[in-house]
Amino acid sequence: MSAPTVLITGTSSGIGLEIAVGAARAGWRTVATLRDPARAGPLRAAAEAAGVADLIEVRRLDVVDQASVTACVADVVAAHGRLDAVVNNAGAGHVGTLEQETVEDVRAVMEVNFFGVLHVTRAALPHLRAARGRLLTVTSVGGVIGQPFNEAYCAAKFAVEGFMESLAPLAATHGVSVTVLEPGAVASEFVANVGIDPEAAIAAAGVYGPALRAYLTRSATAFAAAQSAADAAAVVVATLTDPEPAPRVQTSPAARRFVAVKLADTDGLGVAALTAGWLREPPV
């Protein structure tokens, strides 16, 4: 039999790049997609270094453009005859609070992080059903625990988690497994791509300035001890190849401990105490 085919979104850098290389190493014919193929240089270099360039093909796919998604999935199936797995990885970080941004800002976050997943999943499901394949979606611990100054981002990730949890039993009736993967802090370009100037953001935050300063200080500490993109991707690849993948997988012990607060928190008080502490400036 020919190698199984997996389509991965958001592979220009970070976790997505590492998943693509890792999947190819594991023997998958890997379709690595990104919005701008001109940015595929680091991916191609990593594939060459790993000796898997012949198993990775780069294709354009913009998750917020339904026509782009539909065309890409159709082209992959036409080229390879089947689609065995999809890894929804594309996403964008966002820091902000509702009073200080527009509804359009929030919609943009939802388009990338939720509707992008929906577009890819909808296009792929008939083919995954035919292959009795698997659907993996990289969400976040922010899809389990809401976090201050991450309202729109967490709302999108919560939506993805609810969508996939609801889809999983139905997909399973046709042999398709559905898994969400929840990274915590990961050392990648994802954080840099949020694109805020901390001091400017604090100055513009008005009454929320002190809370934002405390939050950003805490975030810097968390990302100083972040999991590497390669380690997070290794968990995704292991799930991709697992004969019986779990519906929910955290990519690190830290992520597991973090989401456990919510999953055992029936009255919400544990989460409230945890995140409130992020907004208090440490004593001098």
Image: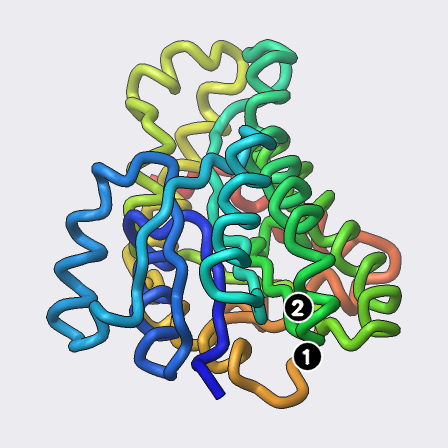
Label 1 belongs to which residue? 246
- Name the N-terminal-most of marks 1 and 2: 2
Secondary structure beneath disc 1?
loop
Quadrant in the rendering for residue 27:
bottom left
The type of residue carrying mark 1 is Ala
Query: What is the distance, in whole Å, between disc 1 and disc 2 at their CAs?
Result: 6 Å
Nearest the viewer among 16 and 272 is 16
Q: Are marks 1 and 2 in contact (CB under 8 Å)?
A: yes
**Who's the residue at 45% across and 76% down the image?**
237
Q: How far across and how far down the image is residue 107, in percent?
A: 63, 21
In the image, residue 111 sits, relative to residue 183, either above or below, namely above
The type of residue carrying mark 2 is Thr
Q: How was this image coloured?
A: rainbow
Quarter of the rendering occupied by the C terminus:
top left
Nearest the viewer among 82 and 99 is 82
Quadrant in the rendering for residue 214:
top left
Say few, some or many: other residues with alpha carbon within 10 Å of mark 1 (under 14 / 14 to 19 / 20 or more). few
From where the camera sits, is residue 228 visible? no
**Count of labels shown?**
2
Q: How far across and how far down the image is residue 139, in percent?
A: 58, 54
Q: How far across and how far down the image is residue 86, in percent?
A: 56, 61
Say left or right for 71 vs 128. left
**Who's the residue at 63% across and 18% down the image?**
98
**Who's the residue at 55% across and 49% down the image?**
73
Q: How far across and how far down the image is residue 134, in percent?
A: 64, 71
Say left or right for 115 vs 3. right
Label 2 belongs to which residue? 179
Nearest the viewer among 185 and 232 is 232
**Who's the residue at 65% across and 12% down the image?**
103
Say few, some or many: other residues with alpha carbon within 10 Å of mark 2 (under 14 / 14 to 19 / 20 or more). many
Secondary structure beneath disc 2?
strand
From where the camera sits, is residue 239 visible? yes
